[in-house]
Image: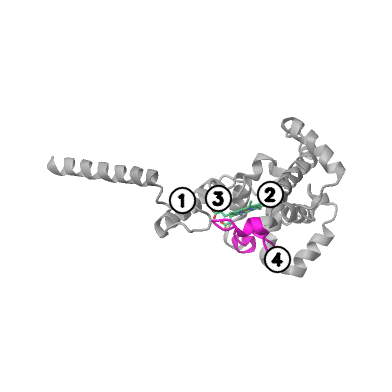
């Protein structure tokens, strides 16, 4: 009995200590500092196990399909390289300031299964810079990017550029493959439509693909504007 009450008191002290520490402000949450070793270890284990478990339910389509890979390279080039970079391309300033850093996806693709790559791309990773692309893109727009990811480990700079050149016209980001610089009138106009009609467009994936395209483009524009202020 005495042991039990000692244990309860000890547990209460630990819990109060943790709460006190949280309120104290001593923990450094800045992105320019790293998590301490234990926190980092705990977060990585949690994240890896979560991704592995949730990806178990994902059904993988044919990722060698050429049209899918070509669609993927344009979409990847628009949506991902700002943070992750690509063969021969460094991440932008935004990507370089992230903590945890956005990894080189060629290395990730060599380590992770296609189902895991899909799950992370669709759902993102909470409290990191990795966005949930599934909020704005249906599955049929995400699989091409995953198809491209699986090819990344075998691509060098010229291989990547070659693929990009032959991918003209493929993918829902085909017009803005040059990155965030694009801002021609047409895409700005349709981005307003896409915002209003997004829910309906989810029913027909063909339309959804073309309509979600400018919406992401619009986000790029926002970030460009904020940057210029
Ligand atoms: C705004 C920055 C940002 C963008 C844009 C972004 N990511 Fe990420 N991504 C991250 C960060 C940060 C991580 C690391 C998260 C972590 O350490 O848990 C990450 C992790 C990942 C991972 C897990 C890699 C691993 O080794 O664990 C995959 C897969 C991934 N991203 C795919 C993509 C794809 C595909 C796109 C484009 C559709 C994309 N990301 C766009 C920031 C970004």
**Regarding mark 4 in the picture, which secondary structure is present there?**
loop
Q: Is residue 108 left or right of residue 184?
A: left
Marks 3 and 1, how far apart in space? 13 Å
Q: Does the CB distance between marks 2 and 1 fall below 8 Å?
A: no
**Regarding mark 1 in the picture, which secondary structure is present there?**
helix
Chain part drawn in magenta? 84-109
Marks 4 and 1, how far apart in space? 29 Å
Residue drawn at 22 percent across, 41 percent down? 8
Q: Residues within 10 Å of mark 4 (few under 14, many from 20)?
A: many
The residue tagged 1 is 46
Say whether mark 3 is within 8 Å of ligand 1.
yes
Marks 3 and 2, how far apart in space? 28 Å
Q: Nearer the viewer, residue 90 or 150?
A: 90
Picture layout, residue 87 above or below residue 190? below
Quarter-of-image position of residue 41: bottom left
Q: Does the CB distance between marks 4 and 3 fall below 8 Å?
A: no
The residue tagged 2 is 61
**Regarding mark 3 in the picture, which secondary structure is present there?**
loop
Q: Nearer the viewer, residue 228 or 56?
A: 228
């Amino acid at each position: 009995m005495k042991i039990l009450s000692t244990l309860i008191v000890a547990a209460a002290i630990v819990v109060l200590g943790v709460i006190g520490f949280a309120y104290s402000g001593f923990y450094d949450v800045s992105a320019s500092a790293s998590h301490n070793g234990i926190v980092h270890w705990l977060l990585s284990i949690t994240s890896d196990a979560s991704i592995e478990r949730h990806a178990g339910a994902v059904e993988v389509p044919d990722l060698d399909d050429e049209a899918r890979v070509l669609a993927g390279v344009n979409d990847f080039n628009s949506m991902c390289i700002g943070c992750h970079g690509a063969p021969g391309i460094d991440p932008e300033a935004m990507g370089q300031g992230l903590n945890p850093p956005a990894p080189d996806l060629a290395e990730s693709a060599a380590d992770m299964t296609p189902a895991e790559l899909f799950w992370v791309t669709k759902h993102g990773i909470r409290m990191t810079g990795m966005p949930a692309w599934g909020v704005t893109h249906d599955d049929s727009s995400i699989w091409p990017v995953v198809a491209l990811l699986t090819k990344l480990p075998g691509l060098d700079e010229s291989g990547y550029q070659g693929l990009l050149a032959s991918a003209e016209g493929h993918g829902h980001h085909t017009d803005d493959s040059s990155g965030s610089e694009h801002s021609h009138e047409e895409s700005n106009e349709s981005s307003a439509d896409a915002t209003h009609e997004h829910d309906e467009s989810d029913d027909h994936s063909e339309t959804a693909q073309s309509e979600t395209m400018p919406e992401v483009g619009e986000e790029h524009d926002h970030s460009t504007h904020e940057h210029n202020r």
